[in-house]
Amino acid sequence: MNDAAPSGGDPEFHEALTRVARAGVDPAPVREYAMGAVSRRMRRRRAAGTLGALGVLVASVALVGLGAEEPVHDEVVSPSEGDTTTTSRARPTTSTAATIAAPAGAPSVAPTTAPTSAVVTTNPSPTPVAPPPSAAARTPAYTGPRDEPGTPSGTLAVPGVAASGVLDIGSGAVGDLVEFRLAFSDPDGPDVEPFVSVRSADSPGETPPEPPTGACDGGPGTDAVLEGSVQFTRAGPQRVEVVVTYCEGPALVFPHEVDVAQPRHAEGPGRAVMALLADEELAEGGAEWSFRADDGSTPEPVVSAERVVHRSSADDGSTRYGILLVLPAGMSGVVTMQPDAPDSPGFAAFVPAEEPEDGSPTHVALQPQP
Amino acid sequence: MTDPPADSPSGPAGGRSARRSEYVEALVEVALDPAVGLAARVFDPLGDDPQGLDRCRTIAMEAITSVALHRSGRADASVTDDHVREVMARVAEASLEALIGHGGTVAFNPDCGLERRTPVRFAVLQDVTSAMRRVDRRVTFMVLAAGISPKDARALLGVDEHVVNASLRRVARRLEEAEPGTLEVAR
């Protein structure tokens, strides 16, 4: 039994486990299979961008200047594998629009591996977690130009990091899944899973990168292409850094700047609402969403087709899990969520008409309904 | 595998990688035997069917892997009872699905409050419950297909007694609708 194994717990449960157990199955192949699957997780998500089957790890960008009563940092956690999502409406992924070219003289990189994507990120955290020292030391100041939505261009400047590459990142509105594609020289080789985060360079907050899974035994210099998508939660111009982290070696930082458009709703201008739950399972599971405005209308909330769960740290230190919704602008009312989970109650929250002036979403805490 | 140890100079990422490996190992260690045992109650009840046991191992392996994928990425990943319950629940669901075309008949646990008037085939049980709620399917497999007592099913799934009883009542109703005269509710 290792440190990760449970101890104590419910005796009735453990007695039941003992009664049902059958010994004699070799655990080695099972362990190997599970480890391999965990190791392949990022790769599968990378492939999902092109195969459209295995799920995409989605990333988020910080909300700058978030109100004090709101969670102080949001981190995107992945959609759970194997689950299905029922959303009120699917929103297509926004196509790539803006491009940052590699610096002059930087080696051009051809895509040779499946694209990946990943996680994270950011608002100022009450207890900021420092990035790996190498990353912190080498994170460059942003030097690239600002892009207008849909306007390509920019030059990567990553001083001090022995890396170069091409970053394409689309533009879109709040709530969209904006694709990004990063081609670079992989320092660890194709068998090493990198951890990719998209974070706001405007925010000092850091969320710790998840470690890559699997072995760190690849050779350097392999060309790699990472693909993923990011869901912006705040409208307006934002400096963004795509950070690639490995088990060892410096993090690779690719800066960019995007101008995120106001959210759109089928019935006109939209507004972003972050609906928060305390239960991660429920947040990651499928659900039916609805909205009843105070004027009696029932415009349908727009939920991203890919389930994106934002992890938020509240002022009291608790963690909450948020789903970004797009509702018609200027409306107040009650948003409800009915999880697919069996025997789960419905949840609801009042959404005020007022919206944060800085373009960040209105955070509402969903409460269970009797 | 060359994952650095938790205290590796490679830093926190390496440590987390090692913890993730530990998590998977711990989950396999704790959950494999019960997971295989649950499925084996239907697919290899006498312990003499290598193919059936292989199927059980596959079901257990998939369930453990699913939970590992879902859980091991957490910063505080350690195996809890809830994680093992999740494995058991997934095994129950997968096993129920695997009953398609199964030629055997169910062996209700005597404590389940249902009595058969006529044999209930596994395939019918699977068909009747396929569109039912997840908790119903889990309870169905554990109590009606695998013959586990409602009390143990309750513990294994981490649900209240009334949840199990309600599931059994719903399933009994569906079975009665599908094959009238099949069941008798004993309590």
Image (cartoon, coloured by chain):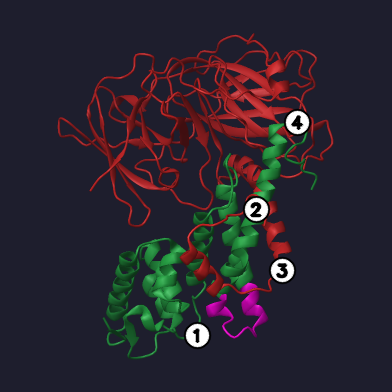
Question: Magenta span covers which residues?
Answer: B40-55
Where is residue A152? Give x, y as percent. Answer: 58, 16
Query: Identity of the amino acid at label 3?
Result: Asp
Q: Please identify the dominant SS of the magenta region.
A: helix
Q: Are marks 4 and 2 on the same chain?
A: no
Query: Identity of the amino acid at label 1?
Result: Gly
Tell us which disc is closer to us: 2 or 1.
2
Is A3 included in the stretch rendered in magenta?
A: no
Q: Could one spot residue A303 in this view of the protein?
A: yes
> Does label 2 or label 1 sit earlier along the sequence?
2
Q: Residue at x 29, y 73 (%)?
A: B169
Q: Which residue is mark 3?
A: A26
Tell us which disc is closer to us: 4 or 1.
1
Give me the C-alpha separation between circle 2 and circle 3. 15 Å
- Give the chain letter at badge 4: A
Which colour denotes chain B?
green
Where is residue B172? Give x, y as percent. Answer: 31, 77
Q: Which residue is mark 1?
A: B103
- The image quarter containing residue A92 is top left
Q: Are marks 2 and 1 on the same chain?
A: yes
Q: Which residue is mark 4?
A: A110
Q: Which mark is residue B24?
A: 2
Q: Residue at x 44, y 84 (%)?
A: B107
